Amino acid sequence: QFFVKKKEEQVPSQELSTGSEVGEKNNFTGPVGDFINQWGLGDFADDVWGSMAQGSYRGLSTDETLVAMGNNPTDQQLEDYTEAVKRVDQYGPSDERRAWNKEIQEEGDTVWNTITAYAKNPTVAFEDALGSMATLFINPTALGTVAATTATYAGVGALATAEFGGVGALPAAKIGLRHGVGIASGMIDATSSFTESVKEGLGDKEWNKENVAELLSDKEFLQKIRSHAIKRGAVVGLV
């Protein structure tokens, strides 16, 4: 039986099954969902699990997206990309995330309004933090970037303080770790931005290899969304 969380018991079940914005998709169902919900943790645990799962799949889709951002991806590469995005999208947004998005859309995408939206929907901040961690640390390319940057900084720090026993290695490694995470985060954000732009470009068309290939065959459109994605990723990486 379809498991409906406590806070949604007043929402008609047919509204939940239509995919409308009333009611969120449940990630924990059946006996497991019933067990979690009886302790009053159903909605929170469900949202957190969904964010972590979505973040993991987003991280795993980064490499496929980077290939799709290239000039001439093959049919197989586009197939891999569209399937990877489908795995990310199987976890829909929580009710709190929808409320957060609505707040931003209505009040404007500013720093203050973002803080206000988080204050009104505090669990979203927790969702974002765990989702971002899952996204970053599940991707081999991102992990490699973090590891390489950290090691490089540590080596430079050790070399610069060699006459003192290399005491600068650890402080430099910490700086390298922070910069490595920034670079990897920027890369992931760039690929997410690219996919968002592709979806917007498709409009009401179905998300599949054929439609995506047709859209990306427009080199002017591809260059535009690729440049936007790189710029956005660069900002995130610097922050």
Image (cartoon, rainbow, N blue to C red):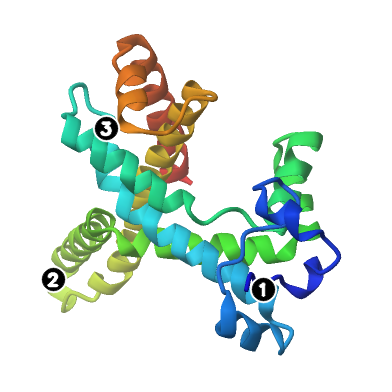
Label 3: state its secondary structure: helix
Element type at marker 1?
Answer: helix
- Using residue 210 as the reference point, say whether residue 204 is left or right of it: right
Q: Are marks 2 and 1 in contact (CB under 8 Å)?
A: no
Give coordinates of residue 80: x percent, y percent: 24, 42
Confirm whether residue 168 shows in the render: yes
Front tag of 3 and 2: 3
Q: Are marks 3 and 2 in contact (CB under 8 Å)?
A: no
Q: Secondary structure at mark 2?
A: helix
Q: Is residue 213 left or right of residue 29?
A: left
Q: CA distance from mark 3 to mark 1?
A: 35 Å
Q: Which residue is mark 3?
A: 68
Residue 189 location (% of width, % of height): 43, 43
To which quarter of the image does residue 208 belong?
Answer: top left
Quarter of the image that includes the N terminus = bottom right
Mark 1 neighbour density, 10 Å: few (under 14) some (14–19) many (20 or more):
some
Q: Is 158 placed above or below 110 here?
A: below
Q: Earlier in the sequence, mark 3 or mark 1?
A: 1
Residue receiving disc 1? 44
Where is residue 221 shown, x and y percent of the image? 39, 14
Determine the residue positioned at 26% across, 32% down. 68
Disc nearer the start of the sequence (2/1) = 1
Amino acid on which the number 2 mark rests in the picture? Ala
Q: Is residue 201 above or below residue 81?
A: above
**CA distance separating discs 3 and 2:** 45 Å
Q: Which amino acid does the dot numbered 3 rest on?
A: Ala
Identify the residue shown where x is 23% and y is 53%: 141
Which quadrant would residue 143 be assigned to in this image? bottom left
Q: Amino acid at mark 1?
A: Phe
Residue ID for mark 2: 162
